[in-house]
Amino acid sequence: MAHVGAVPIFADQTRQLIDSATELQPHNWQPANVAAEKLFRCIESLRDIDELLVSAKRSKNPVKRRRKLKILLTPLHSLAEDIRTLLNDLECNPDSYSRLPSGTRGLLPHMRSQLLRNVAIGSGGLLSTARNKISAHIDKDLSPEEMRELLALAEPAQVGLWLHACVSVISDLIKLPVFFWSCDAGRENAVRILFCEPFVVTMGIGADGKVSSLLDIHLIPKPPRYDVLKLLMKVVSSSKWMFGPNDQRIAEFIEDAPETPWAKSLDWLPHLGPSPSDVKLPPRPSVRPNAFRDGGRTLLIPTNVSFFVKPRIRPTT
């Protein structure tokens, strides 16, 4: 058995990301910092979208499919707005920004610009207009013919393209080691948090409400972001019916090869709309969720987390 000092490392149970539509499951992963909370909002919208896509896919009635598509505009709009909020947090929140690997910070504004260029949210955007006037509620000033015309503009392939643009950005962002997750510690006066894959640490809480000790360490069998990836793949699979044979879409997911660009959405999204301005993007090396490093050791708890205890574990060779 491996140890950190006198503390043994145990094998952890398999956990899933918490689902707001199920009964409370304390053993599952919950967001433990602002970035994870904002990512979780995206996850909830994706779950709603997938349910609607599956239901529409099963229907052979074109009218019922179109009505499902109309309903889908609301969670899709929420998804796009939540991705923009997450990108803003990664750029502007010092707590999130400080954890970004070198070489990633300068790309976030380009990712946001490309998302907004290719997903029609904001004032006058088709997705926002359709969501506000015929999906989230029915605009009292629209005639039936105007409703029909607006819905016709949001055709399945167009809506699917907005969705896949959102998926491409999230699939990039989950590569970044900025998301913390927590689960039930199984004991009183303790917290259990995943700061650094694959270690989840349990810390004792003193009478003053602050962390006072390291209680145990568990090795997780799969990271929470794997559940996000599976959901993204499921959404893409469920949306195939929206596209014709020549429509642009995500066809498959491929693991990043070493030393290849990590921000794949920047390579894909420009083809969906007007090309970017004359901004020259810097090289984009592959970024993986590497452990927090300090003097050749791996930090179980990052140095910029305001805890008293900051144990380290030597990497195995």
Image (spheres, rainbow, N blue to C red):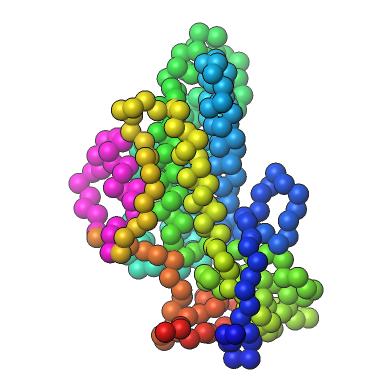
Q: Residue furthest bottom?
A: 6
Q: Position of residue 303 (x, y in %)?
A: 51, 79
State the extent of the magenta-drawn residues as a range.
259-282
Quadrant of the rendered image containing residue 190:
bottom right
Task: Answer with left or right where residue 91 lies relative to residue 5.
Answer: left
Any magenta on residue 268?
yes
Closest to the observer, 145 or 190: 190
Q: Can the viewer see residue 308 in this picture?
A: no
**Is 238 above or below relative to 205?**
above
User: Is the C terminus in the top left, top right, bottom left or bottom right quadrant?
Assistant: bottom left
Q: Position of residue 60 (x, y in %)?
A: 54, 18
User: Is the N terminus in the top left, top right, bottom left or bottom right quadrant?
Assistant: bottom right
Q: Position of residue 20 (x, y in %)?
A: 68, 47
Seen at 52% across and 84% down, the residue is 313
Quadrant of the rendered image containing residue 103:
bottom left
**Is 141 above or below relative to 120?**
above
